[in-house]
Image (spheres, rainbow, N blue to C red):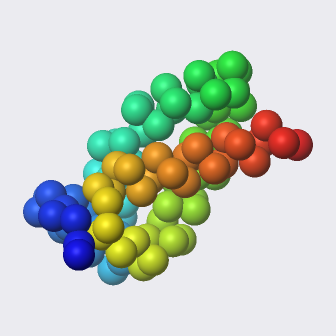
Amino acid sequence: MDFKIDPYENQLVTGCLKFQREAQKQLYMRYKDAMYTILVRMLNNQEDAADALQEAFIKVFSSLANFQKRSSLGAWIKTIVVREALSRQKR
């Protein structure tokens, strides 16, 4: 059973999958602050958090075709962000 994704977010996902720069920018702008906050809390360093945010969003955009709409887009992105932070903590 699919999660009921927000129509605007569905539009953003569709645009990103078509490599539309504006859709990519809007998706990034919608989630960057919340995800950055998570990373700062996990990594205890703003510079590392900023680097991790960029890496996480690269993964988000490259994996977006795999988003199966089983959760909210934000929850899916958060999973990628948290995994990026955990990976950095292990290094």
| Quadrant (top left/top right/bottom left/bottom right) for the C terminus | top right
| Quadrant (top left/top right/bottom left/bottom right) for the N terminus | bottom left
Is the residue 81 above or below the residue 64 in the image?
above
Residue at image point 53% right, 71% down? 62
Residue 65 horizontal/vertical position (percent): 42, 78
Q: Which residue is outermost to the front?
A: 1
Q: As rendered, which of 2 and 67 lies closer to the eye?
A: 2
Q: Which residue is outermost to the right?
A: 91
Residue at image point 38% right, 50% down? 75
Residue 90 horizontal/vertical position (percent): 84, 42
Is the residue 91 above or below the residue 20 in the image?
above
Is the residue 50 above or below the residue 17 in the image?
above
The image quarter containing residue 10 is bottom left
Residue at image point 42% right, 39% down? 32
Is residue 54 in view from this perspective? no
Residue at image point 71% right, 43% down? 86
Is the residue 5 above or below the residue 25 in the image?
below
The image quarter containing residue 82 is top right
Residue 70 horizontal/vertical position (percent): 32, 67
Is residue 3 in view from this perspective? yes
**Total numbered badges shown on the rendered structure:** 0
Q: As rendered, which of 51 and 80 lies closer to the eye?
A: 80
Residue 60 horizontal/vertical position (percent): 50, 61
The image quarter containing residue 69 is bottom left
Is 59 left, or right, of 70 in this rendering? right
